[in-house]
Amino acid sequence: MDKRSHKERYADGLKTRREVLGAEYVDKGMAAVDDFNAPFVDLLNSYCWNDVWNRPGLPRQTRSMLNLAMLSALGRSQELKLHINGALNNGLTKDDIREVFLQVAIYCGVPAAVESFRCAKEVFKDRGI
């Protein structure tokens, strides 16, 4: 268990979130924090992006691969696109991402993989890769 203050965990999580998802995207989201969603953003930054993403047990690339597979399985295209960008930021290659989605085809079904490949192509095009 992380013994640091909540404020430190929040700050470290926000830093990781910005590194993975991109500062521009995260800063835009943070600018939209209000009384309604502030508790959720607090959960994201301190728990998700610090307590889990900053654990030493798995490297960021592995965490990204897991997210790509899980989001594909869940059919969450918008979040998948975000995490395809994050996977690229974490050093995954187009080949790595293709392999994840081929695995998705076998274990989650071809329709899930079709959507995942479509999302990846959009992200690759947007990033010029």
Image: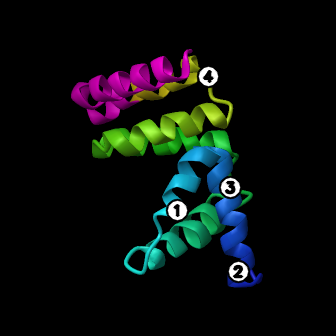
Please, what is the three-letter code of the amino acid marked with disc 2? Lys
Please, what is the three-letter code of the amino acid marked with disc 1? Ala
SS for callout 1: helix
Between tags 4 and 3, which lies in front?
3
Task: Choose between 102 and 48: the one closer to the eye.
Answer: 48
**In the image, is 34 to the left or to the right of 5?**
left
Q: Earlier in the sequence, mark 4 or mark 1?
A: 1
Is 39 inside the magenta-drawn segment? no
Vertical arrangement, residue 55 with respect to residue 97, above or below: below
Which residue is the site of mark 2? Answer: 7
The residue range painted magenta reads: 104-129
What is the quadrant of the N terminus in the image?
bottom right
Vertical arrangement, residue 38 with respect to residue 15, above or below: below
Q: Residue at x 62, y 55 (%)?
A: 17
Between tags 1 and 2, which lies in front?
1
SS for callout 3: helix
Q: Which mark is residue 93?
A: 4
- Asked whether disc 3 touches disc 1, contact meaning CB atoms under 8 Å apart, the reply is no
